Image (tube, grey):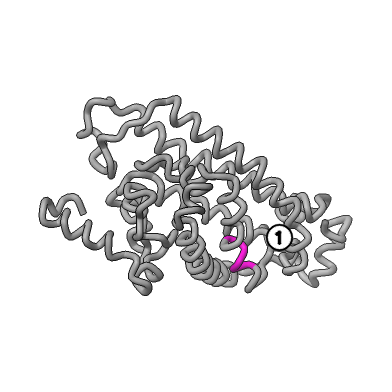
Amino acid sequence: MLPYATAVEAEAALGRAMTGAEAAWFRYSAALPDHLLYCQTIAIILIVHTLAGLPLALLELRAPPDDVSVMPYKLQPRVRLSRAQFLRCYLESSRLLVLHGGALSFVSYPAVKMLGIGTGLRLPSAGQTAAQLVVYLLVQDYVYYWIHRVQHTRWVYRKAHRVHHEFSAPFGFVAQYAHWADVLLLGVPAMAGPAIAPCHMTTLWLWFAMLQLIAIDVHSGFDFPLNPTKLIPFYGGAQYHDHHHRVGEHSHSNFAPTFTYCDYLYGTDKGYRRHKASLEKVSPSHL
């Protein structure tokens, strides 16, 4: 909660006029306790999960089920799911976000406060925000890579991670479809970056929204040619992660969530590279 009753008091404390963004933040957050601001992270994730995943679901559901040619960019065009399966996946993933994600937000707030996640009026610059997000991506990618490898050990996979791999041909809503233990465990890499380089609450919200967009993209099941993520160096994308889901429990490839550098450094992209080489021999258009 901001310690200012009026905008005049806030500007006096800043020693200058508020920017447009700061004025908007003041109007929104002035009367809200910090723990309520932090708990809104789950609402942001749920909104992005719904709005980003829905167009992909509608695209697939509206296509004739017996015609694979109408979706030329679908990675596994012969795998078609029913409306009931899409709905079940969405409802279950949303329930997990609200119940388990919400509970995690509530109990983790003291730790977040201790880390120094701020809610003050002086907002970070665009450059500072961008730099922090890049650091968070790199840290999250490395920590998640090793957790994901543990998730594919025999015991952990069969007790928990197999739920996420229930769909061997993923689609957007699968991004949050998982066992509750996975949901809680993956909070660790997500918060590793902010723990190293604490940020403002608005940056944290942007970070989690970006994570969700990436998760939707890599689970989309579509390899669109004009996808802007193709311009990002070392970005794995949908085709990269689709291979991981297709292999499932026995996958020893493509553990990294966003970039490909960990898989390359530790040799866990060899199966995928062999797969791509075999596709190239059949038809270059598959790549």
Asked if residue 117 shows in the view, the reply is yes
Residue shown at 81%/50% (left/top)? 32
**Residue pictured at 32% horizontal, 47% vertical:** 246
Q: Is residue 141 left or right of residue 254?
A: right
Please name the residue shown 41% across and 60% down the image. Answer: 255
Q: Measured along the vertical axis of the image, is residue 91 above or below residue 250?
A: above
Relative vertical location of residue 42 with respect to residue 71 in this rendering, above or below: below
Give the left or right position of residue 151, taking residue 194 as reference: left
**Quadrant (top left, top right, bottom left, bottom right) of the C terminus:** bottom left
Res. 25 image quadrant: bottom right
Residues drawn in magenta: 190-194
Q: Tell me: 284 left or right of 147.
A: left
Q: Residue 34 versus residue 261: which sits nearer the camera?
A: 261
Q: Which residue is at the front of the view, 1 or 284? A: 284
Q: Main secondary structure of the magenta part?
A: helix
Residue located at (46% from left, 64% from top):
145
Kindly identify which residue carries mark 1: 22
Residue 61 % position (x, y): 36, 29
Query: In what element is the residue under mark 1?
Result: helix
Q: Position of residue 116 (x, y in %)?
A: 74, 69
Q: Per the image, is 113 magenta?
A: no
Kind of residue sitting beneath label 1: Glu
Above/below status of 56 relative to 190: above
Q: Residue 187: horizontal and vertical position, in percent?
A: 61, 57
Q: Residue furthest front?
A: 155
Front position in the image: 112 or 120? 112
Q: Which corner quadrant of the image does residue 2 belong to? A: bottom right
Q: Quadrant of the N terminus?
A: bottom right
Total residue callouts: 1
Q: From the top left corner, tell me how far across and down residue 70 is, in percent.
A: 23, 33
Can residue 233 be seen in the rendering of this structure? no
